[in-house]
Image (cartoon, rainbow, N blue to C red):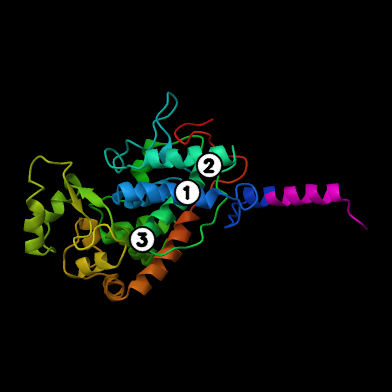
Amino acid sequence: MAVSCKTFVTLLLLSLLASAAHGQLSTRFYDRTCPKLLGIVRSVMAQAVLRDRRMGASILRLFFHDCFVNGCDASVLLDDTRTFTGEKNSNGNQNSLRGFEVIDAIKARVEAACNATVSCADILALAARDGVVLLGGPTWLVPLGRRDARTASIFAANANLPLASSSLSDLISLFARKGLDARDLTALSGAHTVGQARCVNFRPHIYGDRNIDPGFAALRRQTCPAFGGDGNLAPLDLQTPVWFDNRYYQNLVARRGLLHSDQELFNGGSQDSLVRLYSSSTSAFFNDFVVAMVKMGNISPLTGWPGEIRLNCRKVN
């Protein structure tokens, strides 16, 4: 029996809505509705990284902290309101997260090109990928089709974000709860090949831990006193702090990981052999990092009716 054009279109739309409702993402989600999206995100990110190379790492961290709290739903971008206290001032985020203004700039240009079409969650996912590429790292196709959360929770952030003091077993357990295995953990930790950390987060490691190169500890103590200077910054990667490469793992093998949680990956435990592999093979690290990033981007994606397309990434519509 022949099917009318109108009926066919209706069935197609219902199929697409059903796919979205069941959390199916697609790398071509905006091909027709916002064809300029990828170019806009890349352009704004290129300008941001040109001004401040650290910004690539900051946006990547923003995406990580978004996905680990109730999935990749842009809840981390929401400002506090009368009805909820969001994630920005949680233990792992306060005085630490940055790059919100870059996401705002991307969103403004995207809205001008295709109004009320692209979610802040997808913008953040694309910006994180482009930040890695602009710093010399690998590229990958980003599955898209997420929607934005209508709320955020400081309690959820405090309960789900890893700490600089975390042990290897704690990290493996936390990642497992997100559907990520130990290999994903070790590969994603390689994001610390770029960016900086605050003294308050690495002070316990450089003053109290034994699994650290003495010369490296002495170097870091010069700008991170035992008391005070909590906000003083140090590069997570001693060798190439603004390039996305495998030097982070070489640092771990040399006992020069900045955070306690970093050095836990190479401390006589289950991840030592993988750290050694990544330290000697950039391609092995890049390949596993891409796989892990796509997996992380698929943590509980908010799709369909429960979410929305925010017009302003900092507040619900």
Q: Position of residue 196 (x, y in %)?
A: 24, 51
Q: Residues within 10 Å of mark 2 (few under 14, many from 20)?
A: many
Q: Residue at x 31, y 47 (%)?
A: 51
For disc 1, the marked residue is 41
Disc 3 vs disc 2: Cβ atoms closer than 8 Å?
no
For disc 2, the marked residue is 110
Which comes before the other along the chain, label 3 or label 2?
A: 2
* Label 3: element kind: helix
Which residues are the magenta region? 1-16
* Label 1: element kind: helix
What type is the residue that disc 1 sits on? Val
Asked whether the viewer can see residue 161, the reply is no
Q: Residues within 10 Å of mark 1 (few under 14, many from 20)?
A: many
For disc 3, the marked residue is 188
Q: Position of residue 142 (x, y in %)?
A: 51, 57
What type is the residue that disc 2 sits on? Val
